[in-house]
Image (cartoon, grey):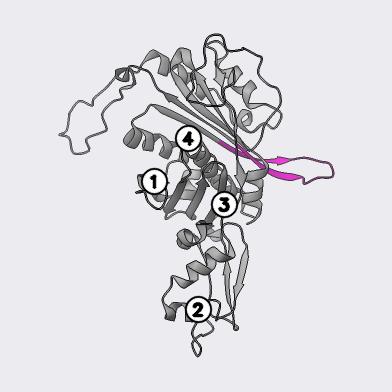
């Protein structure tokens, strides 16, 4: 069954059809398993992911990790019901020291990773690439609204682990996430190498909130021998978790397997409803006007220090677009200026993000 609106209840008389066999890339497919009180989203990424990752020619381990972060961001950001932004950011001491994924509702995404090539090795898992630090998830509702931010400590675990910790501590909604990223190699006249990714988010949302109760968080400083708080999980959620654990990476990224058929494989015994897919696009929101405004926000002496060879050059680290300004256009007063190094990074994100 298909509905245009995920929050709209479908009546028993709604049409029932076979799952579509046509794969749809660069989209989020919301779904519901009413018999188990489960709601979820399935992301499949192809050309949009490939566009983001190939702009920077990331080493495969870095591309895979950033791809996982992009998938996780689309699973979470696509739930926004307003024209805002969902920003996922990591800052750690690992080989990949910084990542940022910016999802602008309803469908635009961009991403960037900073890494130390000398510390990158083939076969490194995501936890080893990240190391220790923190993951921040920020919801920006616009200039007139306050931001909401959730922080999760990273201590050598994967992004899936971090997502589970976030929902346990911040949202307190029973949630499971699966992420997969891979490289596709094909013959023919077109590009032979492509990045692909997929992910699934599953949540237990029963009408009776007591059914979704989870064990209290570890108290940390409890006396030795204290009994940990335990709560028996609802049978429906136990079943839901067992089903999502059976999903293999290849199923999430298989270009020949449609999202609807994958969901049918998992939940056909209980019945699954799908809603209209939400399309995704790799699109940076930087512009010459936005960069110009960002430059004017700096102090005069800082702008003067950006002049090199008689011009100011700013490169967007999201999309690699290059913007050149004369000293006058950059707001540098006559007589000032030196051969300083110029670099624009995601630290200037607020200046580059707004159209």
Q: Which residue position is annotated with label 1?
A: 154
SS at circle 4: loop
Quarter of the image with the C terminus is bottom right
What kind of element bears circle 2? loop
Q: What is the distance, in whole Å, between disc 4 and disc 2 at their CAs?
A: 41 Å
183 lies above or below 298: above
Residue 212: x and y, percent? Answer: 34, 21
10 Å neighbourhood of mark 3: few (<14), some, or many (≥20)? some
What is the total number of numbered labels drawn onto the structure image?
4
In this view of the protein, can residue 125 be seen by the observer?
A: no
N-term mark: 3 or 1: 3
User: Residue drawn at (31%, 20%), measured in percent from left and top?
Assistant: 209
Residue 272 in percent (x, y) is at: 55, 17
Secondary structure beneath label 3: loop
In which image quadrant can residue 195 be found? top right
* Residue of label 4: 79
Q: Is residue 29 above or below residue 298?
A: above
Nearer the observer, disc 4 or disc 1?
A: 4
Q: Nearer the viewer, mark 1 or mark 2?
A: 2
Residue 352 in the figure: left or right of residue 192: left
Q: Is residue 85 visible?
A: yes
- Please provide percent x and percent y for residue 149: 36, 46
> Which of marks 2 and 4 precedes in the sequence?
4
> Circle 3 is placed at which residue position?
121
Q: Nearer the viewer, mark 2 or mark 3?
A: 2
- What range is drawn magenta here? 180-197
The residue to which callout 2 is attached is 331
The relative height of residue 256 versus residue 77 in the rendered view (above or below) is above
Q: Nearer the viewer, mark 3 or mark 4?
A: 4
- The residue carrying pointer 4 sits among few (fewer than 14), some (14 to 19) or many (20 or more) residues within 10 Å by Cα, namely some
């Amino acid at each position: 069954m298909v509905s245009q609106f995920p929050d709209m209840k479908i009546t028993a008389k709604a049409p029932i059809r076979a799952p579509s066999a046509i794969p749809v890339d660069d989209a989020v497919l919301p779904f519901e398993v009413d018999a188990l009180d489960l709601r979820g989203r399935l992301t499949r990424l192809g050309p949009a992911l490939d566009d983001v990752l190939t702009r920077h020619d990331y080493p495969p381990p870095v591309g895979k990790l950033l791809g996982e972060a992009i998938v996780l961001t689309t699973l979470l950001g696509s739930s926004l019901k307003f024209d805002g932004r969902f920003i996922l950011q990591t800052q750690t001491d690992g080989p990949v020291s910084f990542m940022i994924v910016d999802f602008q509702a309803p469908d635009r995404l961009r991403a960037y990773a900073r890494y130390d090539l000398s510390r990158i090795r083939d076969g490194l898992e995501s936890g080893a690439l990240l190391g220790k630090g923190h993951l921040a998830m920020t919801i920006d509702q616009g200039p007139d609204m306050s931001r909401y931010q959730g922080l999760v400590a990273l201590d050598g675990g994967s992004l899936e682990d971090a997502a589970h910790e976030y929902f346990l501590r911040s949202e307190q909604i029973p949630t499971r996430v699966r992420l997969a990223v891979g490289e596709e190699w094909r013959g023919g006249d077109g590009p032979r190498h492509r990045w692909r990714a997929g992910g699934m988010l599953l949540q237990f949302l029963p009408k009776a909130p007591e059914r979704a109760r989870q064990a209290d968080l570890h108290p940390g400083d409890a006396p030795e021998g204290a009994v940990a708080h335990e709560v028996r999980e609802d049978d429906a959620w136990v079943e839901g978790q067992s089903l999502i654990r059976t999903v293999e990476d290849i199923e999430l990224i298989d270009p020949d397997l449609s999202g609807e058929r994958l969901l049918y494989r998992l939940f056909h015994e209980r019945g699954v409803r799908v809603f209209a897919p939400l399309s995704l696009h790799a699109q940076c929101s930087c512009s010459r006007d936005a960069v110009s405004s960002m430059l004017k926000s700096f102090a005069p002496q800082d702008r003067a220090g950006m002049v090199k060879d008689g011009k100011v050059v700013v490169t967007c680290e999201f999309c690699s677009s290059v913007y050149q300004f004369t000293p006058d256009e950059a707001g540098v007063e006559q007589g000032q200026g030196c051969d300083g190094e110029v670099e624009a990074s995601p630290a200037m994100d607020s200046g580059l993000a707004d159209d």
